[in-house]
Every structure is written in C-alpha cells, then in structure tokens.
Image: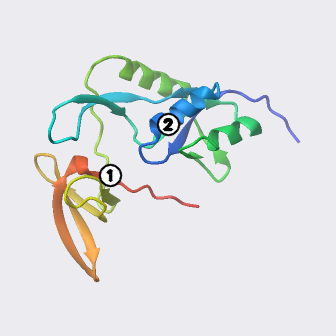
C-alpha cells in the first residue's frame, strides 16, 4: 500500500442552516484553521436599515486540515457540521489560491456582488414573510428584487411573488 505524507489543504464544510458562526467557533476551539468569508449586507428586518456581516456562502465554511482520521472525525463531530464536500472517493480540496483570493476580497470594505443563486427548477423555502415555511419550485426572477415560486398543493400549482431575500435554496443531497 502506498503511503503519502498528509498535506494540509483547504476543504469546504457544509453546515446546518445558520450555523456557520457556531461551526467556525467550534473548529477554532479545536485549534483548526477555519475561514468563514463574510460580506456586508442590508439586514432583512423591515423595521431597520442596518448593514450586517453575513456569510458570503451561507451554509459553508472552509477548514484547513490534512484529513488524518482523528482530525476528520473532530471536524464532522463539531456542533452544526454536516459533512465535508466531496465525491465518492472522499472530500475534495479547494485550491489555496481560491481561499487566498476570497480572504483578500472580504478583507476590504468594497461591495462584493454575487451571482444569481437560484436557477429555474431549484427547490426553495420561504424563510421570511407571510409565506414562511412554505416550500416550492423557483420559477424566475422578477423586477425590483422579487421572485416567482410555484407551490404545489392538492396536485395543483399556485405561484406566489415574494422578495428574493425571503427565499433560500434547499440543498440537494446525494447520499
């Protein structure tokens, strides 16, 4: 059996929804190098117009590890951690240059534009507003930050028009 020296690389760790800070803190307490890129966004609260720091990639943090069995277990045992992103052969590392670029981008106070996060056919959940908790299928973007979501009930579809910030994609997991 061929033994390779364990090399520390960056990996993407999927977290439970809104657990990015908890996971980052937990991994830091375990003396692991972790990176949670955050950007300034406007608060979703309707009563205030605050700028808050929110994860650039909701539901994901970067962790640098050599994936030795003990460390791998410690990472996935962290409260809020789901799994390391990879394929059938195991976790797939992210290039150091990618993480360095992200660190440089979020270090400044410049506006960072992100691409559209939803595609037609994505399963989504409404997380804010009168339709909170409703799941459906993303149909399209409308003007002025609105989106159209189809909701199936009793074998029929009803389309609702909601604020794009009130909708989150439901991750699709392949076991």
How many residues crowd around disc 1 within 10 Å: few (fewer than 14), some, or many (20 or more)?
many
User: According to the image, what is the colour scheme of the structure?
Assistant: rainbow
Identified at 79% across, 28% down, the residue is 5
Quadrant, the C terminus: bottom right
Q: How far apart are marks 1 and 2 (CA)?
A: 20 Å
How many residues crowd around disc 2 within 10 Å: few (fewer than 14), some, or many (20 or more)?
some
Which one is earlier in the sequence, the residue at label 1 or at label 2? 2
Which-is-in-front pick, marks 1 and 2? Answer: 2
Q: In this view, does 73 lie above or below 163?
A: above
Q: Which of 170 and 4 is in front in this view?
A: 170
Give the residue furthest to the front: 47
Residue hosting label 1: 168
Q: Nearer the viewer, residue 65 or 120?
A: 65
Q: In this view, does 99 lie above or below 149?
A: above
Would residue 51 be visible to someone looking at this image?
yes
Residue hosting label 2: 22
The x, y position of residue 21, in whole percent, is 46, 34
Q: Is mark 1 on a helix, strand or loop?
A: strand
Give the residue furthest to the left: 144
Q: Residue 54, located in which quarter of the rendered image?
A: top left
Q: Nearer the viewer, residue 95 or 138?
A: 138
Number of numbered callouts drawn: 2
Q: In this view, does 124 lie to the left or right of 5?
A: left
Quadrant, the N terminus: top right
The x, y position of residue 67, in whole percent, is 70, 36
Would residue 68 be visible to someone looking at this image?
no
């Amino acid at each position: 059996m061929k033994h390779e020296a364990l090399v520390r690389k960056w990996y993407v760790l999927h977290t439970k929804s809104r657990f990015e800070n908890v996971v980052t803190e937990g991994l830091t307490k375990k003396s692991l190098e972790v990176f949670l890129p955050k950007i300034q966004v406007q608060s979703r609260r309707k009563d205030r117009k605050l700028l808050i720091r929110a994860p650039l990639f909701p539901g994901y943090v970067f962790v640098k590890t050599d994936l030795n069995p003990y460390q791998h277990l410690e990472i996935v045992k962290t409260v809020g951690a789901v799994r390391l992103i990879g394929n059938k052969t195991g976790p797939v590392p992210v290039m150091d240059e990618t993480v360095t670029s992200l660190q440089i981008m979020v270090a400044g106070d410049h506006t960072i534009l992100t691409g559209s996060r939803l595609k037609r056919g994505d399963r989504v959940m409404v997380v804010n507003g009168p339709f909170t908790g409703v799941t459906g299928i993303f149909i399209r973007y409308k003007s002025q930050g609105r989106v159209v979501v189809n909701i199936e009930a009793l074998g029929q579809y009803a389309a609702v028009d909601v604020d794009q910030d009130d909708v989150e994609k439901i991750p699709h997991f392949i076991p």
